Image: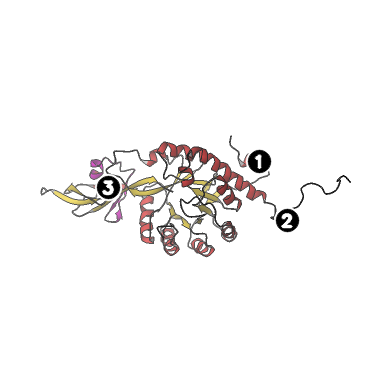
Amino acid sequence: MTTTLEDVGAEVRDEPLRIADRTFRSRLIVGSGKYRDNEEMVRAIRAAGAEMVTVAVRRVDLDASKEESLLHWLDPAEFFVLPNTAGCYSADEAIRYARLGRASGLTDWVKLEVIGDQETLLPDTDELLKATRVLVDEGFTVLPYTNDDLVTALKLEEAGASAVMPLGSPIGSGLGLLNPVNVRILKDRLSVPVIVDAGVGTASDACITMEQGADAILMNTALAEAERPEIMAGAMRMAVEAGRLAYLAGRMPRREWAVPSSPLGGMLS
Amino acid sequence: MTSDEIEILVNGQPRMARIGQAVSELLSELELDGRLVVVELNRQILRRGELSEVKLEPGDRVELVNFVGGG
């Protein structure tokens, strides 16, 4: 069973997710890290309905027996492969990794990460901005992972980022969306897509995030560390769609006091 | 070390190579597919077409990278 926007009725009109020159039907973007094996990873990614999948750039393991390339499992004909710069702590380092990713010949897109702190993996926004400017200048389509601060996000947009990717909570924490207000502020003020990246732990987190108006969610650990990744991926797919629909539907106002749902008139005397 | 051998660094590990050995030959020795691996030589990325043209020199630092799972 797959519930889609189309099932709900023709009156719900949603645009596809548009980033730079590409459009995506799915608003769920997933990572490929930390799965128990590649087969489980691909099953989960398919169950998520994801079209875009992030990958990391690392040294070839020369000691490992000849294992199959990740791209054997993530066929670029089926998935849009998005290289990241995870693990980089300076603009220079992130730029180097971005160039290596592009040299694969697959894409000139990059999920730009510049980490500033080992314990929290929070972004170094100075270095992030610097790297964004350089890579945009070199013709990259840059999707920077950032904090949920409006001023930084505006600077990234100004620098030519094709989307901004604020964290919901720290990478791999599974704490969910800690500050929904900031996502709404970002959505209100930015023209480029806002993709909440990191922090989602379970389906309700994804739903709440999409209800704020986020354009998409990028997640990895919530799927890879679930006891049953493929099932969780299906749940996430539905949660993202449900949250998106609820956002488009426009929620009722919040009130401090009860308002009866049944008529006040017609009561027996 | 014989006279026609040179020492290079591959992914941070010392390795012997032959004088005049092309980078593509190093990849073959390591049983790596040049279409799936990106090669950086002394911090310069080599294009695929350059792999058979560029010859290894003593002290070269070669980085061989590929995509792995990541978020």
The mark lying in front, picked from 1 and 3, is: 1
Q: Nearer the viewer, residue A140 or A49?
A: A49
Whether label 2 touches label 1, CB < 8 Å: no
Number of numbered markers? 3
Q: Position of residue A86 (x, y in %)?
A: 40, 53
Q: Secondary structure at mark 1?
A: helix
Residue sitting at the far right: A269
Q: What residue is drawn where x is 48% and y is 62%?
A: A159
Which residue occupies the foreground of this view, B51 or B65? Answer: B65
In the image: residue B10, left or right of residue A226? left
User: Hey, what amino acid is under mark 3?
Assistant: Leu
Separation of residues labelled 2 and 1 (CA atoms)? 31 Å
A158, above or below A5, in the image:
below
Q: Chain of mark 3?
A: B
Pointer 2 residue = A257
The single residue placed furthest to the front in the displayed view is A269
Q: Which mark is residue B51?
A: 3
Q: Which residue is mark 1?
A: A8
Q: CA distance from mark 2 to mark 3?
A: 72 Å
Q: Position of residue A37 (x, y in %)?
A: 40, 38
Work out how far the residue at label 1 is from the one at label 3, CA to CA, in angstroms: 54 Å
Chain letter of mark 2 equals A
What are the residue bounds of the magenta stretch? B25-47
Within the magenta stretch, is there residue A77?
no
Q: Left of A250 or right of it: where is B5?
A: left
Q: Residue furthest top?
A: A1
The front one of A138 and B32 is: B32
